[in-house]
Image (spheres, rainbow, N blue to C red):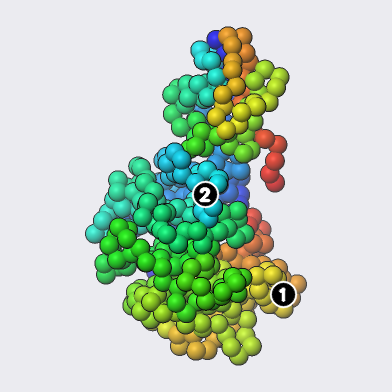
Amino acid sequence: MHNKLLVGTRKGLLIMNRDGGDWAVESAHFEAIPVVYAFRDPRADTIWVSLDHGHWGGKLHRSRDLGASWEEVEAPKYYEGAACPPDFSIPAKTNYIWLVEPGGVDEPDRLYVGTDPGGLFVSDDGGDSFQLVDTLWHHPSNTHWFGAGRDHPGTVAIQVDPRDSRRLTIGISVGGVYVSMDGGESWEARNRGLYADYLPDPLHEHGHDPHIILASPSNPDVLWQQNHCGIFRSENGGLQWRDISDRNGGPAGFGFALAVDDEDERVAWVAPAVSAEYRVPVDRALVISRTEDGGETWQDLRNGLPQANCYDLVFRHALDKTGDTLAFGTTAGNFYVSDDRGDNWRCLTNNLAVVYSVRFM
Amino acid sequence: MAQVKFTPNLKRFFPDLQECEIDASTVAEIVAAVDQRWRGLGDYIIDEQGALRKHVNIFVGDELLRDKQTLSDRVSADTKIFIVQALSGG
């Protein structure tokens, strides 16, 4: 159970705290600067923050004293001559830093960074420097990568297997799922069972759009994916995916955000919207959907959430869970918390900027 | 030497930033020189391929920089350089 939250918004970072009461904002940082992602690396007790300056480019900052002071580190850079997939006509540069993920507990100096235009970067010196993971960047399937929502593909999901730090699962939007069993030396695409209704061949081996991928901590072979074309689950590390979107008329289908249970590999939460073409909540009512049986059925959790005239979406990194507590922020600047696994929600504030990222510290 | 001025907005990230004089023959050389003086400043002005960031402008005298890809615009001893942010956002 964590008693602090990092909330990245279009207008800065908030650190929230619930010691001795309900959640309240403890401090604000990077005021007026878009904070794409913020998380605490427990291995080094370091907070990492990705900024998206409108003018000055994407930057990385870290704090080794829980936000009392910050240090800018050199952001990942594409090498001279690198060009963007799929046609390699545009020079590649770090347009946006989607997320930072820690390596395994047995590799304390390793960090991964996912970027637009699709490059995965790795650091083996605690983030002092980053190198492009060439083996993935040059994967022969990269001619099937392309931008969606943004101009270029993005590495938006990075999962390190807690049983073996060399096993990596990466999500590229748009590109698909890539797995390495050797710490990034080699990669294979694992998209079987996914479909992409925007492709001439929806079952093509490549060109899928994972919005986010998470592994169940209790069984990391179980992967969950909120995809552009539905919700998918794999029980064998992505070798085969199964569509678990709600087939009974419920809203769980299109969306961005995802949370999985620490203890039970059958339990996950999503934040549905209507569809790619109608990016609004279903019936203009905010809902979090939960499955407790691996996606066979979904429950729609609405208590405490607005059920009329609502246009809130939940971005891919803006839902998180610790213990029985879930928290999410929305595109309309609203922030909700549940202490009973989503059965009941309460609104902490209505007045934030667009929320990009929510992570328990 | 060319006189180089910066938008005050950059002082948020480089608090001791100030107007300076640089001996250089191109704008690219000026950016490299100010990056030496204020480490990391260059990354705020150009990207890793050497191109001017999309929402940054550089005035060379009264004219906007022409070569936004390699910043090869010539400067002379009396050129005034002004590095500013584009007017955008919300």
Q: Residue furthest right?
A: A309
Q: Residue at x 26, y 56 (%)?
A: A107
Q: Position of residue A39 (x, y in %)?
A: 44, 56
Q: Is residue A218 above or below residue A92?
A: below
Q: What number is the disc on residue A145?
A: none
Q: Residue at x 37, y 52 (%)?
A: A133
Q: Chain of mark 2?
A: A
Q: Position of residue A166 (x, y in %)?
A: 28, 63
Q: Is residue A302 left or right of residue B48?
A: right
**Quarter of the N terminus of chain B within the rendering:** top right
Q: Is residue B20 above or below residue A233?
A: above
Residue A77: quadrant of the picture: top left
Residue at numbered disc 2: A88
Q: Is residue A40 above or below residue A81?
A: below
Q: Is residue A248 above or below residue A61?
A: below
Kindly report which numbered mark, 1 or 2, lies closer to the viewer in this rendering: 2
User: Does residue A6 show up?
Assistant: no
Q: Nearer the viewer, residue A249 or B72?
A: B72
Residues behind callouts 1 and 2 on a single chain: yes
Q: Amino acid at mark 2?
A: Phe
User: Does residue A148 show up?
Assistant: yes
Secondary structure of the residue carrying tag 2 is: loop
Residue at numbered disc 1: A284
Q: Amino acid at mark 1?
A: Arg
